[in-house]
Image (spheres, grey):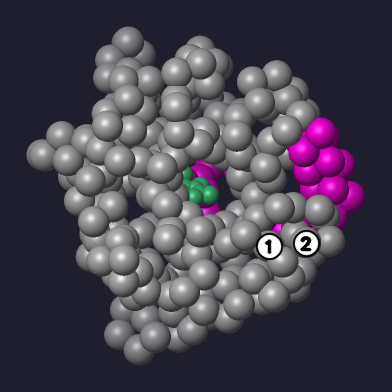
Amino acid sequence: MPGLGVNIDHVATIRQARRTVEPDPVWAAVQAELGGADGITFHLRKDRRHINDRDARLLRATVRCKLNMEMSLDDEIVAIALEIKPDQATLVPENRQEITTEGGLDVLGHARRMAEVTKALQAAGVIVSAFVDPHRDQILASRQAGCDAIEIHTGRYANATGRAITETIEEIRSGLRAGLDAGLVVHGGHGLTYNNIAPIAALRGFCEFNIGHSIISRAVFVGLSEAVAEMKRLIDKSAGI
Ligand code: PXP
């Protein structure tokens, strides 16, 4: 049964719009857990544009479900991850200009660094997942680097229209199969919404979906725990639970 990881970065983005103390992403994590979240996801970026070091530490101290830290391969960020020890680290690409994570990680191109960071995190007891496009070579490279899991980038599917929707679902389906065949745990995320989650949650084999923007957007109107509960119900229904 696929779990739901709620990405709370956008709560911190609202706080940073005023450089003040509210809304607090740590409160958001509590509300998400009360709504039934199976995990809390945050991205500590090098530029600290939303989540900061204080948030990361408090989340580690307070979150009771799975804590998933999205992170780049940057030395400073890796050192923080080794110190706070999230339950899971999802390795993502990061560049300064992007509005959000734009593409999957080039695991093939960073094979040595990936293996080094993966080994260090695992030695600290952290599960390691790589955020990749649904491409067989990148998925196999993640396995080669020693990762426990992959998160398949669902952004192309989320942005697709017309016939391309079916094509992108097929890409995700074959990425999911390649990941499972390689012995990896498979997650999915990016751009998933209340309107587009059903066909993806219906694919057998996903272990977890990480969803942020759509849930936080709905929370503005219905509250966060209700927004999380609604997404949980949709995932369970689409997965046939
Ligand atoms: N998964 C990863 C690896 C991400 O970088 C993000 C965005 O931070 C998400 C999932 C969530 O994406 P969205 O906010 O579009 O739901």
Figure label count: 2
The C terminus, quarter of image: bottom left
Q: Are marks 1 and 2 in contact (CB under 8 Å)?
A: yes
Q: Amino acid at mark 2?
A: Arg
Residue at 11%, 39% in the rendered image: 222
Q: Amino acid at mark 1?
A: Leu
Is residue 155 part of the magenta span, yes or no? no
Q: Residue beneath label 1, please?
A: 184
Relative side of 97 to 9, left or right: right
- On residue 143, the disc is 2
Query: 24 or 173, which lies in front?
Result: 173
Q: Mark 1 Cα within 10 Å, few/some/many (few <14, many 20+)?
A: many
Residue 91 coordinates in the image, percent (x, y): 65, 45
Question: Which element is circle 1 on?
Answer: loop
Residue 2 coordinates in the image, percent (x, y): 43, 59
Residue 57 coordinates in the image, percent (x, y): 54, 16
